[in-house]
């Protein structure tokens, strides 16, 4: 029976849906994480009576037709790039982005990565780096005799050195934004890569037109909503159970037919 295969595609789709939801829930506390949503599409149809086909020599047409579908497929996992809430950390090197933009990161292979995770540290040379030791681009080096470190909302990095009163500018944090930020490739470690779908990176300073601002001593939380995810999980589970019930009902119908033929 066709319904067995159709229901099987439904179970497979809801299995993928649960996997996506579980990934979201697992990353509820991941800094800068963006929620993922599974998208579905119906499969091909068999036309048993094509809509609009002629039914007489007088030109009358079939108004609706007769189509039988073959189920569902997981078409995509789209990333929701909405703003997460700001969490105070009181840590000098932490920086959150409020609004549009990603920090640019120099990867070990020379590629430029992009992130919303502003959990920054200093390496042995005083360079501003990510938790994995990747350099922030443009590179900013903090002198060893710095006694105060600040990042303005415009991304200007300043320090006060021992024996000095006035702050000294070290550099400028820059942000990158994309026409289609949901088209970025996720590579793990809170990093994204540019793709043909995302478009070319547009680079600017925080506070410029179209760019967000930087908040020192803050981090952006995940935008995952726990209540929404649990609700979606229950709905996915029920959909899985209903598809399993279709398979069970189809099996009973086949068993009845088999008994009749005996």
Image (cartoon, rainbow, N blue to C red):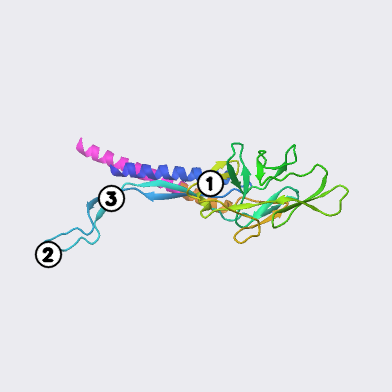
Nearer to us in this view, 90 or 234: 90
Q: Secondary structure at mark 2?
A: loop
Residue matched to label 3: 68
**Which percent across, then down, holds residue 210?**
59, 60
Q: Is residue 27 visible?
A: no
Is residue 108 positioned above or below 74 on the image?
above
Residue at 59% in and 46% down: 114
Is residue 105 positioned above or below 82 on the image?
above
* Mark 2 vs mark 1: in front: 1
Q: Alpha-carbon distance for marks 2 and 3?
A: 28 Å
Most extreme residue toward the top is: 262
> Is 69 one of the magenta-colored residues?
no
Q: Quadrant of the N terminus?
A: top left
Give the label on residue 58, or none: 2
- Which secondary structure dominates the residues rendered in magenta? helix
**Which percent across, then down, holds residue 48?**
22, 51
Q: Quadrant of the C terminus?
A: top left
Residue at 19% in and 58% down: 53
Q: Alpha-carbon distance for marks 1 and 3?
A: 41 Å
Q: Are marks 2 and 1 in contact (CB under 8 Å)?
A: no
Residue matched to label 1: 194
């Amino acid at each position: 029976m066709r319904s067995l295969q159709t229901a099987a595609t439904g179970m497979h789709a809801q299995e993928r849906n649960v996997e996506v939801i579980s990934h979201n829930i697992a990353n509820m506390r991941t800094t800068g994480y963006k929620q993922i949503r599974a998208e579905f599409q119906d499969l091909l149809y068999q036309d048993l009576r094509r809509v609009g086909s002629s039914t007489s020599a007088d030109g009358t047409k079939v108004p609706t037709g007769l189509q039988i579908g073959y189920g569902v497929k997981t078409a995509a996992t789209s990333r929701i790039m909405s703003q997460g809430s700001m969490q105070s950390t009181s840590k000098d090197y932490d920086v959150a982005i409020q609004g549009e933009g990603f920090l640019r990161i120099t990867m070990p292979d020379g590629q430029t990565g992009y992130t919303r995770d502003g959990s920054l540290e200093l390496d042995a040379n005083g360079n501003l780096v990510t938790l994995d030791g990747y350099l922030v681009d443009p590179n900013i080096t903090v002198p060893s005799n710095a006694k105060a470190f600040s990042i303005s909302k415009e991304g200007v990095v300043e320090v006060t050195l021992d024996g000095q009163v006035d702050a000294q500018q070290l550099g400028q944090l820059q942000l990158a934004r994309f026409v289609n930020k949901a088209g970025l490739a996720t590579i793990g470690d809170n990093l994204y890569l540019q793709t043909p779908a995302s478009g070319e990176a547009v680079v600017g300073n925080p506070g410029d037109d179209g760019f967000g601002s930087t908040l020192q001593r803050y981090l952006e939380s995940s935008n995952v909503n726990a209540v929404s995810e649990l609700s979606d999980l229950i709905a996915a589970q029920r959909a899985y159970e209903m598809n399993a019930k279709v398979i069970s009902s189809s099996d009973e119908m086949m068993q009845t037919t088999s008994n009749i033929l005996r």
